[in-house]
Amino acid sequence: MNFELGAPEWLFLVPALVALGWRVKALRLGEPLRVLLLGLLVLALADPRLRVGGGGLDLWVLMDRSDSVAGPAAAQAPEVAAILERARGRDDRVYFIDYAVDAQRRDQGDPVLRGGTGRTNTAVALELALGQMREGRAARLLVLTDGYATEPLAEVAEKVLRRGVPLDYRLLGEGLGEDVRVSLVEAPARVLPGEAFLVEFTLQGRGDGEVPWEVWRGGDKASASGVARLQNGVARVRLTDRLGGSGAVRYEVRIAPPEDAHPENNRAGTWVEVAGGGRVLLVTNYPNDPLATLLGAQGLRVERVTEPASLSAASLTGARLVVLNNVPAHRVGAEFLAGLDFFVREQGGGLLMVGGKNSFGSGGYFASAVDELLPVSMELRKEHRKLATAMAIILDRSGSMAASAGGGLTKMDLANSGTARAIELLGNFDAVSVHAVDSAPHEIVALAQVGPNRERMLQSVRRIVSTGGGIFVYQGLKAGWEQLQRAQTGQRHLVLFSDAADSEEPGDYINLLAEMRAAGVTVSVIGLGTESDVDADFLKDIAARGGGRIFFTRDAGELPAIFAQETVSVARSAFIQENTEAAGTPGWSQIAARAPKWLPAVDGYNLSYLRDGATASLVTTDEYQAPLVATWARGAGRVAAVSFPLGGEFSYLARAWADYGDFAQTLGRWLAGEDAPAGLAVRTELRGETLAVELLHDESWSGRIASTPPTAALAGASAGGARPLVWEKIEPGRFRATARLAPEEAARGVVRVGAAALPFGPVAASGSAEWAFDREALRELRQLAARSGGGERLDLAKIWAAPRRVELRSLRLWWLAALAVVLVAEAAVSRWDLRRARRWRVWRVDPRAGGVR
């Protein structure tokens, strides 16, 4: 660090020195402040500059950890660090930043990137490095990546260039190799039923060749197939199709190249919505559900679903109302149930749950994704001890349970978590026992009331470990039955968890189960595996003979949820199976002007309690005063709970009710909401992973939108929460908002204008940008390196020999500031001297005295 004299400012020294020689006396340079003023003026004109840099170098190494380069990055990271450490000088420093979706310094953050590894966000890593560089130190950037950033570098490039930091790069991996990918899938976002439309897709690779392809419609099986011929690395395929019905359908293109370096980009797809007007999605347990005819008479298209496991969030597209009619939660697709929250609260849809032995708490809906939507709560209150349950849980702790389930957990750990969740959901007056079984049953928790023992029980079940061997099923069932025989409660249930591929020693299970069923005990089975495993039929038979449910899952991570669902179905099974009188309330006036002539009694009902803010229109007259018809608004949508059956068993009195049809139609019409108002439209456009949403309106809406701005929200396929979008006014009558979609995310959205809700989606990127290998991104990185003074680095050790940037920093502003301060001080001193001199003269000359004193 030293000083240099600025040029050509030094020329100003000549006249300054000449003036100094001629005016020494006139300037009173014998006074120190005048000398200092002149000296500062000379320095400001000469502008000597401070040389900064040229010493130690701070090297910022940005290591790409995204999915497309994860293998090479992990393999080369230790070698890179070792080379740079060996070659650096004494005053040099090296800092490592790992990045993918987000970025963090290796010496400061968690080794796991919190944002995930599904993107290559090089810009974020550059921003972090620039923000942490020390002033006064020479710095350099080294980016280790495959070069295919998923975010543009234009904005951060300007910051790099303004900072004057050279950027070098080294490409990881082996390039694209013989890669063929699905680069684009296109289809219209919305079609009418029966309308012909095109599905087009583009394949990209290197050179020429043949690539087999399939198009899957709806995910079930390939609806079309063929062979595409690459010419100069590109092939385009066009297909025509028609769709009936309603909802949304996903088209997915799959290719199988003979040689392929990156199979991750061999699939891509898009969604097509069938716009057939408002519809009712009737998810029912009855083949001939009377609600289908009644609701259809209101002009709504009714789609009856008898296989609810096939439902997904996309099934909600175009729906105005969803009816869950006595269908247990475990039979309904989990994504569909989770998607109902956004459907109701944000998209303004309607939801109706109808009573029965497979509905509400009895159907496993307590603490489910739809629990908080309902206007009734399903917890069992303290005064209902006669409805308490005794449960025996039998856990497989054979050798297969020691296998890893990911995340540092074993299958046994997740089974323990499921058992703990079951105990957490049981009421204080319920009772539970737990046995772990290998070749013999081992008592973990003896049958006891949950309330005073809950914490002790939870601690015990979380410590179960696998000890090897197989599971002797009969011994486990027998141990559970012995515990349940001691129970004093009216409802007794056993849950068996076992490996579907390794369930040994059935013993005399048939007679044992017959004895248990005769005593009113039910048995359900949770099988880890699939229905095709060798012991799956044995487990199915246990559930069938035990009068319970059967669950299969190959994902041990789902065990806690399955245990919870089974526990809720049993412990919250408060279906009152007796004729109960009912009475109407004024609450129906919020739905229709005329109340029906209410039925005097019901054959049975699901016990529940009215939530705060909800309205009951019909209640029981028994000791519970329970709501039979309850309604409320949730967000933009409406929800109703009819707690007595409208079909099947226990529905005789309801179906004989004179106003049955009018009641169902009026409630359905209210829940379905109003038609979309005229003068509003929503349009979506997807480019890569960026979704653009446009709101178009005519002049009739201008005043209302000016006083109440529109809103928009977006949610993933199964997400309950929503993220807001920010509008930009493009021109009168047109608003636009954009959002980045996560890879493989099927997003649903809504635009709200006042009380009107305009739903859209699902929409999804046709493929992941992480595997698109956009050559423009690589070109952008190379251009930035060249413009900054860097380039490609093959020999990393030589990076320390790169020229250190030397910066000449002007000090003129400091000299001028000092000059101003001294000038003010000199003026003050001069003024003080002048006043003192005047006072001295007055004192020396007195005109009245006629002379000097």
Image (cartoon, rainbow, N blue to C red):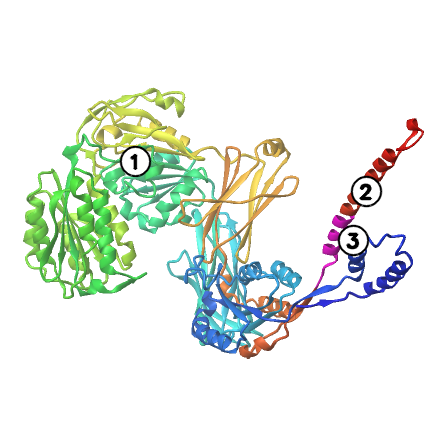
Front label number (2 vs 1): 2
Above or below 838: residue 561: below
Q: Which residue is mark 3?
A: 32
Disc tally is 3
Give x and y (percent) for residue 185. Answer: 51, 60
Give x and y (percent) for residue 836. Answer: 81, 39
The three-letter code of the residue at mark 2 reads: Asp
Whether residue 320 is visible to the viewer of this picture, yes or no, is no
Q: CA distance from mark 2 to mark 3?
A: 14 Å
Question: Is there CB contact under 8 Å for labels 2 and 3?
Answer: no
Q: Which residue is mark 2?
A: 833
Q: State which tag comes first along the sequence, 3 or 1.
A: 3
Q: Which residue is mark 1?
A: 354
Identify the residue at image location x=32%, y=39%: 371
Disc 3 element: helix
| Near-viewer residue (66 or 346) | 66
Give x and y (percent) for residue 842. Answer: 87, 33
Above or below 71: residue 19: above
Q: Tell me if mark 3 has few (under 14), some (14-19) or many (20+) residues whose alpha carbon lies within 10 angstroms of its own.
A: few
Q: Which residues are magenta?
A: 809-823
Give x and y (percent) for residue 442. Answer: 10, 56
Identify the residue at image location x=41%, y=60%: 110
The three-letter code of the residue at mark 3 reads: Pro
Q: State which tag comes first along the sequence, 2 or 3.
A: 3
